[in-house]
Image (tube, rainbow, N blue to C red):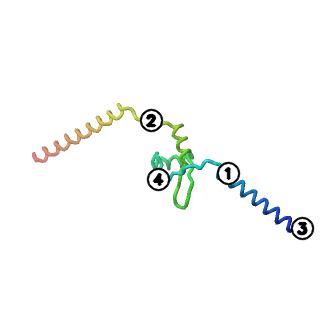
Amino acid sequence: MTAGDALHELLEAAAEAGAKRALEQVTSSKPSRLVPLKQCSIGYRNALDLVRRGELETFGMGNRKFIDQEQLDAWLLNHPLTVPAADTTAAKVDEIDAIIAANHKRKQGKGSSASKG
């Protein structure tokens, strides 16, 4: 056997071993579920903000971006959603009602001064 033949056999054995190892890693690892960024559960804009801040990682395929659903779920567990207090909403409704009433009075005032002139 020549040195060239020995090298050839060694390279073939190494390539075969590498291919087997890669195949084992691919088949044994749990596949992640990639979700298109535009279809993720927190909304597209929120997802973009998290990606920009470095809190979530995206994966690209062509022009499309994906997020790992497990990573998103983990983020959601660590960042519970907050709901605004009910009295804040009531205060905003009262403020809007006051603005509408003031606008209505202003319109009535313009109408009566126009008829006087």
Query: Which numbered mark, 3 or 4, is in the foreground of this view?
Result: 3
Q: Position of residue 31 (x, y in %)?
A: 59, 50
The earlier-in-sequence mark between 1 and 3 is 3
Q: In which quarter of the image is the N terminus?
A: bottom right
Nearest to N terminus: mark 3 or mark 4: 3
Of callouts 2 and 1, which one flags the residue occurring earlier in the amino acid sequence? 1
Q: Residue furthest left?
A: 116
Q: Which of marks 4 and 2 is nearer the N terminus?
A: 4
Task: Say which residue label 4 marks.
Answer: 38
In the drawing, what numbered circle is on residue 82? 2
Q: Distance between the residues labelled 3 and 2?
A: 74 Å
Q: Earlier in the sequence, mark 3 or mark 2?
A: 3
- Res. 83 image quadrant: top left
The residue to which callout 1 is attached is 25
Q: Residue at x 12, y 44 (%)?
A: 112
Which residue is the site of mark 3?
1
Callout in the foreground (1, 3): 3
Residue kind at label 2, given as amino acid type: Thr
| Mark found first going from the N terminus, 1 or 4 | 1
Q: Distance between the residues labelled 4 and 2?
A: 23 Å
Residue at image point 68% right, 52% down: 24
The CA span between labels 3 and 4 is 60 Å
Q: In this rendering, is residue 82 above or below 21?
A: above
Closer to the camera in the image, 96 or 45: 45
Which residue appears farthest toward the front when viewing the image? 1
Residue at 54% across, 49% down = 51
